[in-house]
Amino acid sequence: MSETPRRDIPGIAGSAVFIIVGVLAIWGAREFSPLGSVFPRTMAAVMILCAAVYIAMALLRPQAPAATPAGSNWRRGALIAVLVAWAFLFEKFGFLSTSLFAYAAILVIANYDRWTPRLALTYTAVGAIVLGGLYAIFRYALQVPLPQGLLF
Amino acid sequence: MMPGIEFLLAALAPFNILLAVAGVVAGTVIGALPGLTATMAIAVLIPFTFGMRPESALIALGAIYTGAIYGGAYSAILLNTPGTPSAIATTFDGYPMAKRGDGDLAITLACIASVTGGLVGAMFLLMFAPPLARFALAFGPVEYFWLAVFGLTLIASLSEGSMLKGFVGGAVGLLLGTVGVAEVGGDIRYVGSFNELLGGIDVVAALIGLYCVPVLIDLVATPDPHLKLTQEVKGYRLREAASISWRSKFNLARSSVIGTLVGILPGAGGSIASLVAYSEARRVAKDPGRFGKGEPDGVIATESSNNATVGGGFIPTLVLGIPGTPADAVILGALLVQGIRTGPTLFGAQSQIVYTFIYGLLIATILMLPIGLVIGRYAFKSIVAIPKATLVPSVALLTVIGSYAVHNNASEVQQMVTLGVFGWVAGRFGYTASPIVLGLILGTIAESGFVQGYLIGNARGQPVAEFFTRPISLGIIAFIALGLLYPLFTARLRARDNANE
């Protein structure tokens, strides 16, 4: 069964966003010296031009858009939230404490099996080995000063 | 003339051999996991190399790279799921072979082909990189600018249907590369109130984010892929595979050379090389109809060519500082952390590092034969048995700790996650990560070449002519035009063929 060609709405929307970004980049470059502004201005202009041509072509010649990936959007959103919180909080609260929390949270998000005491125990052990092992390698073998923060 | 034996002996040092073995094993294991690419394998394992000597770090990264490209074949053959994008074409014949009970043979064939391709690529690197380096000394700022543009146009033009999207992605990367204090002129650009961005966007953090985070986001969304074995691995079938490989020696040689040449072209990686080699093997075959139905020549073509891109890709990476493949872009980032400035002078001033590494890569490639066979035989089931619930948080932990360890800087972890989420959103709109990454990597070279060329031209009173009259520049511009027109040409040919049918 072949997919009926239709307009690539996500592609058009993305291109529109990039046109706005390009305009903002040119506007932001007005404060730079001529030497510093020539390259970003040119690149932003190329970006605007290509995105505009893409929109025009997508409107004139519809074709099958990229397939939207299936799956659970709440899990995707939850993972993004955990990653963002992890990245912005680990310096303040400590690498080990935030990683412990984030690892457990992502494990719960990524798990599709029914939780049993045995499964929970196995995953806890695996998590402890991976987190403990990597922490030891980076902190003590590679001498990376992982932040201690308010907690640990 | 072949470089001296002292470099070979240095590469044979026990620590370097250990790194080569560990790198090939780690690369093969990561490459075999669907969704985890060779680029990602290198990106997450880079921090382990920071404390090493530069040549040892390079050997480890080269071994991971070559192992990961080979590892992609396992899941391509046994699960019909390419472990890495460069193994996409391996599914065409590898999976039909597995379905009819020849999965073990296909894996052994893939191993032999990968080793052969890897050796051809590494030999090209050993013999042709120095002359290329001398040639590269004739490159001025304008040539570097056009070369950077060449790298960008290739990735855009090879993505056929979405060429314009590739260009937009490349421009986004180039603009991201301008953030921070400008290299020429010293302007502070697009920093706003975020002083952390004064040093610019860190390339390694950006690479980890753009390549790894979108994969993780989509991995948690479904319980698939079910990593179930569809075929019991029975044995090596080494003799049978060696005899088939010998019969297909021309295919093996041709595909290895194609892989090396495609690897040398900036921006084109193993996925493109394997597709080109596959279509070429099919074109010259006596019975092209057997391709796609379990033809061993298909597996040989794709697996030899994708591993040949490893050595080939290192040629522009080391000689010109232009990454030959996306994975080379990550390695280039690691070299910057090591304080190595790639370029023509690298083969003179730091020849010890380069030649020890090249010999190390050759050794790692040879070691891949026994290691690959053993892993294929015994460890595959346990690799695929790692549940996603522990795989995703472990990889996420590696990305966070890896991007932090580059400069011990928390803001780079934030850059990594932000760009990763951006990369995922852009992917939903049909904009892939590779052009953005290439733009970011090539941005500095492109800008300093562009601005310096412009200044030189201005001083001569002809800024435009400076870009369009130098002989090497014209040669590169011709390749750019070829790269841009080729997809249009093939699309037209295909349309005509379809009309004839």
Image (cartoon, coloured by chain):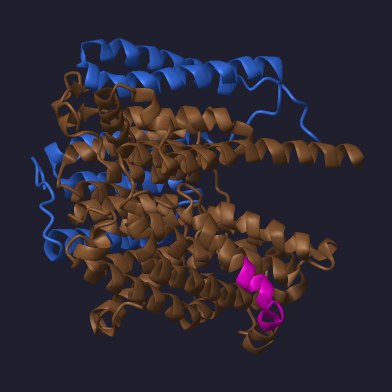
Chain colours: A blue, B brown
Q: Residue B45, percent across and down?
A: 31, 59
Q: Is residue B291 magenta?
A: no
Residue farthest bottom in this picture: B239
Q: Residue B135, percent across and down?
A: 37, 56
Residue farthest right in this picture: B501
Left or right of B249? Residue B156 is left
Q: Quadrant of the N terminus of chain B?
A: bottom left
Predominant SS of the magenta segment: helix
In the depicted view, which residue is nearer to us: A23 or B182? B182
Q: Residue at x 55, y 48 (%)?
A: B223
Left or right of B435? Residue B104 is right
Q: Residue at x 84, y 42 (%)?
A: B497
Q: Residue A60, located in which quarter of the rendered image?
A: top right
In the depicted view, which residue is nearer to us: B470 or B35? B470
Q: Residue at x 29, y 65 (%)?
A: B58
Q: Is residue B251 magenta?
A: yes
Q: Quadrant of the C terminus of chain B?
A: top right
- Does B199 appear above or below B329? above
Left or right of B282? Residue B302 is left
Asked whether residue B271 appears in the rendered view, the answer is yes
In the depicted view, which residue is nearer to us: B87 or B328? B328
Number of numbered discs present? 0
Asked whether residue A67 appears in the rendered view, the answer is no
Q: Residue B121, percent across and down?
A: 48, 68
Q: Residue B38, located in which quarter of the rendered image?
A: bottom left
Query: From which residue to which does the magenta span run?
Result: B244-254
Q: Residue B361, percent across and down?
A: 38, 72
Q: Residue B22, located in which quarter of the rendered image?
A: bottom left
- Does B101 appear above or below B193? below
